[in-house]
Amino acid sequence: MDRIIERYSGFVCRHPYLVLLMVFIISISAIYFSGTIEMKTSSDRDFLPENEPVVDTLFAIEDEFGSTNTVYIIVDAVPQHTGSNEVHDVRDPRSLRYIDNIAALAMHTDDVIEVMSPASVIKSINNGRLPGSLRESQELTYKNGLLDSYISRDYSQALVKVQTTDDVNLDTLELELGKLIGQVIKPPGIETNLGGTILEQQVMKNNIQPDMARTTTYSIIGILAIVLLLFRSLKYGLTPLSTIMFGSLWAMGFVGLIGMGLSSTTSGVLSMIMGIGIDFGIQVVTRYRMELPGKTPEKAMAFSLSNVIIPMSTTTLAALVGFQALHLGKLTFMGEMGTMMSYGVAASMAAAITVVPASIIIFDTMELKKTIKKLTEVRT
């Protein structure tokens, strides 16, 4: 093992440009595959334990009869002026006709199984017709307790329940219902909005990428500040940062390659990968700076790699065991997090023993200060 590590260390130090070329090729592929990552909507199954009788029964029922998701269309009476002609009570015939039109159109939307509304309940107890006056509507309301599930106690809000199949396309559904609400003419004093658990999932899905970009940016800034403060050198401070940048890129590329996808439960993994992966880059740079006095950059880096690869490999192996142990739990989303963390840590170590040593050797052997000075003199 020691001989293999020494040969590898010598190869990296003798051929840093070749190593960076290989890194560049891998990174181009990773960029492509990371662009294919799909944002997944988290379902209840992701948060429920496996191999539990109650949960297994629930899944069996859903598989046999199909599960139903519910979208709510909320109709609010929000009059702006007291005593005006606006709708003050959702039992107003104008409001009920509006709700009935909304429900009828929603029923013709793709993947909709059933639509229930206060208008449909009132029609079922009133010979299939809607009341012609508010007084008649009030009398019917008092006679039927079913309307309590569709009309609020203060009669300012009505609920239309739209049940869909469990494989509904949320993007299409939200768009179609939004168009539907915009097309039906509302009585004065009425406001209509969409709600429901599956639309909340859609909101979470749409926020995965912005949240990842935000948390990743904050993580990089924080880590960079700490590393620069530690090394007090721009060159040696930025070099360890390449560990988490390339490591995260390679990990996301592999996730895209295998079609794993990202969900709201795994979107924060990237920041955790950075927090762990930066340690690998710091180890290499710190050991190199300790070995550099009295040695050439190539010899110092070769000796450094030979001495840090085994400890780093041990750390990586221990982390992989710990992350994969998350699969032993009954919560499936914990296993997905563990898998993604494993990819990130392994990729960060790979970056630490390729990108970091090759970059440092190139920087230290090029004598950047002299090169910049010569370029400046040539221009002048």
Image (spheres, rainbow, N blue to C red):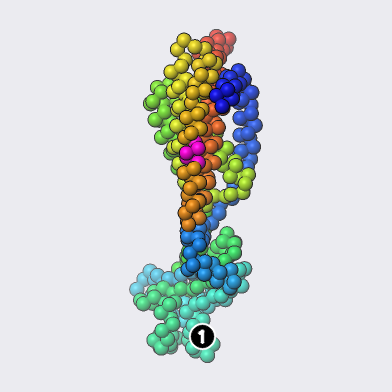
- Quarter of the figure with the C terminus: top right
Residue 20 visible in rendering: yes
Instruction: Point out residue 302 in the picture as x, y percentages from the top left corner.
Output: 54, 19
Question: Which image quadrant: the N terminus?
Answer: top right
Q: What residue appears at the point 49 percent right and 23 percent down from the top-left corner? A: 307
Q: Residue at x 63, y 44 (%)?
A: 257
Is residue 343 on the magenta stretch?
no
Nearer to me, 69 or 305:
305
Q: Amino acid type of disc 1?
A: Lys
Task: Name the residue tied to disc 1.
Answer: 123
Question: Which residue appears at 44% of the width and 77% of the height?
Answer: 150
Percent across and percent down for residue 367 are 53, 13
Q: Residue at left 58%, top 68%? A: 63
Residue 268 lies left or right of residue 31; in this view the side is left
Q: Residues within 10 Å of mark 1 (few under 14, many from 20)?
A: some
Depth order, front residue of 209/291: 291
- Of residue 310 and residue 37, the one placed in the foreground of this image is 310
- Principal secondary structure, stretch drawn in magenta: helix
- Let me know if residue 207 appears in the view: no
**Is 195 placed above or below 13 here?**
below
Q: Nearer the viewer, residue 261 or 370?
A: 261
The correct choice, above or below, for 341 with respect to 170 in the image is above
Q: Which residues are magenta?
A: 316-320
Residue 319 part of the magenta segment: yes
In percent of width and height, residue 160 lies at 49, 73
Q: Position of residue 346 (x, y in %)?
A: 53, 37
192 left or right of 60? left
Residue 78 versus residue 340 in the image, above or below: below
Most distant residue in the bottom direction? 127
